Structure formats: C-alpha cells, structure tokens
Image (tube, rainbow, N blue to C red):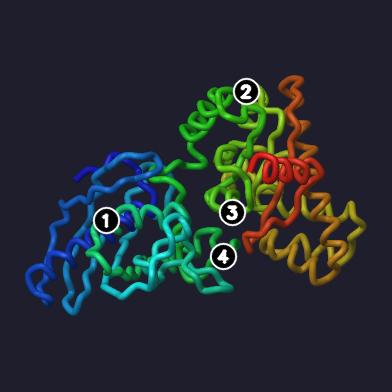
Amino acid sequence: MTQATPFTLPVWVAAAARAALEALLQAEARAPDAATPRGSSEAQPLELLEPPGVELVPVEAAAALGDGQALGMARCDPGDGLDLTRGLLVWVRASWWEPPQEPPQGKGPSQRLLLEAGEGLGVLAGSRELCLSAYARRLLEVNLLPLLPAGRGLRLQLVFPRGRELAGRTSNEAFGVVDGLALIGTQAVVQSSAAPDRLEQCLETLRQWPRSPHPRDLVLVIGENGLDLAPRLGLPAGLLLKAGNWLGPLIVAAAEAGVERLLLFGYHGKLIKLAGGIFHTHHHLADGRAEVLTALAALEGMGGPELQRLFQAPTVEAALAELQELDGPLAARIEARLALAIETRSQAYLARYGRFPTRIGAALFDRARQLRVAGPCGQELLKAFRHDLG
C-alpha cells in the first residue's frame, strides 16, 4: 500500500498499538491462546487530532501471542526529506492489566492505559520515565480507550529495535533523553525544519497572523523539543509557531505581519548561532558555535588555557557545564551576554529590511528542558506571555 501522507512517529506507534489491541480482542473472543495473524496490507483507522480527521495508517502485521498478549508492528514512513525514522520498525506488545480507579475526567491521563519503554525507546535520564509528548499520549488514548472492555486496562510496551542505534545520530541526549528515540511529535504530519516547503508553510501562517486572537504577539519555537516544552513553561499554545531553521526570513515576515512582541524560544545550542549573525541554523549550512561562545567568554575577561578548553569542548552544553564548574558567576554572565547578543543581532538583522516597531526577545532552555536564561527583552516577554496571556 502506497502511503502518500508523511506521518510522524507517534502515528505509527498508535497504528501498531491499535492493531495489537484488535488482535488481542479477536483472540479472546475465540480462544485465549489463539493466534491472529494479519497481512501487511491491513490498515488502521486513526483519529489524528492534529489535524483532526480519520486516516487509514498501514501496519506490517499483528498477532496474538497467547497468554493474554499480542504484538503489532508498523514501519515508519516520514515521506521525502532527511528523516532518520524512515523505515524504522515499530513494535507494540499489548497485554491486559487491572487499572486503579480512573481520575476525574480532565484531571490527568487515563489510568486504563499503561505505557512502558521497551528497547530503543528514550527515557528521561533522571526519572527513567518514557519520554513521551502530550500529543503522543492523547493519540493513543483517543484511538484505544473506546475499544477497551469495561473495567479493563491495557499495558503497552513500546519497542524500536533500532532506536538505541539511531538515537546516537540525534540531539536527544542533549535534552537528557537516553537509551533510545524520544516519542515527542506534536502533530500527525511530518513538517521538515529544513525543507523549503516548511518555510512556505510558516510564511503562509504569518500572512494570516493579523487575524489571530493576539496578532501583535508571537513565539517562534525552534524544534520539536521547544514546541513540546513551551506550553509546559506557561507559554500559550496559540502564540507558538514552529520555525525550524529558517529564522531570518520568519523574523522579517513576522514584523511585516504586524507582530510587535516576538519571542525566540529554543535550545541554547541552536540559538547561539544567531549571536554570531547566522540566521539559517541548519548544521549543513553553517556552525560557528564554538567561535561565538569563545568570543563572548573573552569579552567577559576569560583567557589563557581556560579559553582554549572552552573552544575545544565537544558541545555548547559541555562547554557551559565546564564553565559552571570553573566559575559559576562567570558562567552566568556569559550566558546573559549570549542572550543579549541574540536579541541585539536579531534586531539588527530585522533593521536591514525596514523600520518596524517589533521588539525581539530571546529565551533559551538547556538539556534538562529547563529555562536557562533570557535576555532583557526576553524576560519581559516571558512574563507578559505567561502571566498576562496564559
């Protein structure tokens, strides 16, 4: 079956899970130990939520394993573009369990659905909890809970056989995610950060921005981690636009659309490029992060062997961690200078294209998914967006 729509990883997981649950239900209806093979041409009808609507999503196979268990398999197809999940095999093992009492409606995730990280699924380094976005969880609940018999709970063990290997080619570990791939998609359809069509989609959104509830305000979010984290930090979902790597054109387009308060929200290892005047942040185009950080440190008075070690650090995260151990107050000053430099260079970039009343702030988070630092304007906008509009 040819799949035209490039679905994100949570959709393929949900399809495999639904196939496993159907196999479990069919086997139980006949005999507890019956196997129920399914052909690779089968597809699962899923409510996608973001965007709304039901689509058929193909699965590879599903079968009951006996003893109240079943296995569903799907193969990820993210469409064209550079996506390491292409061809990724997704396994979901389903089994029954006795759930505790359900929380009141709207008071948290359903207790009837228990999710466990199997091989290749990323977990948070500190808590060992499955790294799962709110969208991925909601997608599973909406598509599985209506099928469960009354009083039954469903345990799902999620497995990506190549997840641990592929995670080494991502920035997951920079965000404290270990042992595999994070399941953090925020919508059903893949939107490449680097592809030109993604830029056009963002530009079209900004053309319509004057008709939004808060046309003067916007948060440009860099990457899926930022898009997942921003609402948890109190930033209103209606202000968020995933910018990907095309920050320069989008800053200008936002100003042209009438945005007067613009917050750049992203991982400091990405936004640091703006402090060096690099406004397309894909690593294939330009880097310069070590040079920018070293220059900022030198402006704060660092020199000698310490400055050389900073320059040679493997990542921005590692460099800042070493700075923190060496001299905490100095590290804080350098980070504050970094946030200010991002705001200053962004304002200067915008000024090349005209005179706009737009004020640009920057807020940076770290690998622990914690807000690390904000520039002077960023602090003001964070307070306004989180408290006045949140």
**Image disc number at residue 173:** 4
Q: Which residue is mark 3?
A: 232
What kind of element bears circle 3?
Answer: helix
Q: Nearer the viewer, mark 2 or mark 4?
A: 2
Residue positioned 43% across, 64% down in the render: 103
- Residue 98 placement (x, y as % from top left): 31, 75
Residue hosting label 2: 257
Relative depth, front residue between 365 and 309: 365
Q: Residue flagged by tag 2: what amino acid is it?
A: Ala
Say which of marks 4 and 1 sits in front: 1
Is tag 2's residue or tag 1's residue first in the polypeptide sequence? Answer: 1
Q: Amino acid at mark 4?
A: Glu
Q: CA distance from mark 3 to mark 1?
A: 28 Å
**Other residues around mark 3 within 10 Å, as few (<14) / some (14–19) / many (≥20):** few
Q: Which residue is mark 1?
A: 146
Total numbered labels? 4
